[in-house]
Image (cartoon, rainbow, N blue to C red):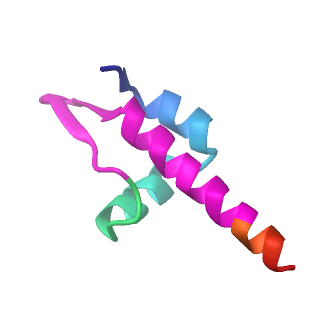
Amino acid sequence: MRILSKRQVKELVLYSPQHIARMEKAGLFPRRVQLGVNRVGWVEAEVLAWLEERLARREVQDERS
């Protein structure tokens, strides 16, 4: 299992940390893991699954067009 830093997640999904936090709070993005007092991370597999779901939705929308 690999844990991604805030910077790595930001580079992967191309959203600001604030937007990622809002999506997390709304249940629309994988939840962070508290690693220490001032350190958080995200499970890489969960973030990649979230991205794959977005890509799959895009493909379905493309087929409908």
Q: From which residue to which does the magenta span run?
A: 30-59
Picture coordinates of residue 19, whole percent (x, y): 49, 59
Query: In the rendered view of the protein, which quadrant contains the N terminus?
Result: top left
Residue at the (57%, 48%) spot, across then down:
52
- 1 drawn magenta: no
Which residue extends farthest left? Answer: 37
* Vertical side of 62 occupied by 16: above or below: above
Q: Is residue 3 left or right of residue 36?
A: right
* Vertical side of 33 occupied by 52: above or below: below
Q: How many labels does the image show?
A: 0
Picture coordinates of residue 6, whole percent (x, y): 42, 33
Q: Is residue 31 left or right of residue 61?
A: left
Q: Is residue 19 left or right of residue 39?
A: right
Which residue extends farthest front? Answer: 63
Picture coordinates of residue 57, whole percent (x, y): 64, 65
Residue at the (30%, 65%) spot, across then down:
25
* Vertical side of 40 occupied by 60: above or below: below
Query: In the rendered view of the protein, which quadrant contains the C terminus?
Result: bottom right
Which residue extends farthest bottom? Answer: 65
Q: Residue 58 or 7: which is nearer the viewer?
A: 58
Residue at the (45%, 54%) spot, across then down:
20
